[in-house]
Amino acid sequence: MAALMRLADRSPPGVPIRTAIPHVMIWSSRMPTDARLALFEPKFYLLLQGRKRLLIGGRDLEFGAGDCAISAVGLPFSTQVIEATHEAPYIGLELSLDADVVATLMGDASVEETPTAPTFVTAPLNEDVMDAVDRLVRLLQRPDDIPTLAGQAERELCYRLLQGPMGDTLRQTVQKGTRAARIRQAIAWIRQNAREPMRVADLADAAGMSGTSFHRHFKAATGSSPLAYQRYIRLLEARRMIVSGEADVTGTAFASGYASSSQFSREYKEMFGTPPIADRRPALRPTRRCPSQEGAAPA
């Protein structure tokens, strides 16, 4: 925790801290935050200090120190830090899951499907996983050991996760030829082509399912319909473009695949609670100058 606290001091709230250990990131905040929308990527997540609220897949969850989660696909969710102070900041650890490591540990990724395995699962930290996390994070105190030992420590952690209550969900990230794998491929296609027109019937055909079956299994995996999922991905990227100043509202609307700026603004407000113009960087907003300012550099 001492090593993680030092890292937390170097980053503003809401900005992930990339550590010297490959695939490991830290999130930190010294105060509660507003809720924000994001994607829960395929990864292992561990809350180490503070408390957090998640709205994901129709579930309202509160996480405390020692609570873990794994997602097999990118899931829409809302996240909010609800307990954090300057003396005891919220600290969360993420490990991006290396599919090659998981597949190697499984021996054969095409194992029999577990029909009841959810795409998102939570569990309290058990002793085996805690020991593996401890060995991985302690490498931050001995950076010269990271190139040699980080891969081994990550492999041990994945092994312990596969053996525990979240193992079936972790296996989904690499299984092939299963219904869950075909849904995962459809999700990947949507994310890579979110700006393009999409026919759900084509995705269902590619997955080898009827339209009704595909829609049912897609919603079971992500908590939303294929079209709603595409819209969520589009709008997350659109907000990034607007907040970063990459484009104005009209340019973002067309770049995001919308044919109408008004429809884009309406759906943006429905999702984020504010119109896109409210999220534009000040530098993109037109300014008025009095005559004496003509020729002066912008403030």
Image (cartoon, helix red, strand yellow):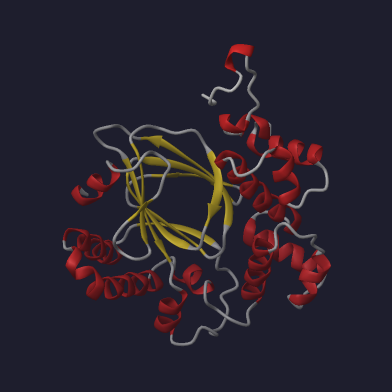
Q: Residue furthest front?
A: 295
Find residue 225 and report its horizontal and vertical position in percent.
73, 56
Q: How many marks?
A: 0
Q: Residue at x 40, y 32 (%)?
A: 32
Residue 72: x percent and y percent?
A: 53, 65
- Residue 283, picture quadrant: top right
Image location of residue 241, percent across then percent down: 61, 45
Residue at image position (24%, 64%) is 131
Residue 25, placed above or below residue 289: below
The quadrant in which residue 127 appears is bottom left
Residue 237 picture location, percent across and down: 62, 49
Residue 126, above or below 67: below
User: Which residue occupies the foreground of this view, 31 or 193?
Assistant: 193
Question: Which residue is located at x 23 percent, y 73 percent?
Answer: 149
Please indicate whether residue 299 sits to the left or right of residue 88 in the image.
Answer: right
Closer to the camera, 30 or 262? 262
State the residue lying farthest toward the bottom: 108
59 or 147, which lies in front?
A: 147
Give the answer, above or below, for where 87 lies relative to 119.
above
Q: Is residue 268 above or below residue 16?
A: above
Relative depth, front residue between 48 and 283: 283
Asked which quadrant contains residue 278, the reply is top right
Judge from the rendering whether residue 131 lies leftward or rightward of residue 47; answer left or right.
Answer: left
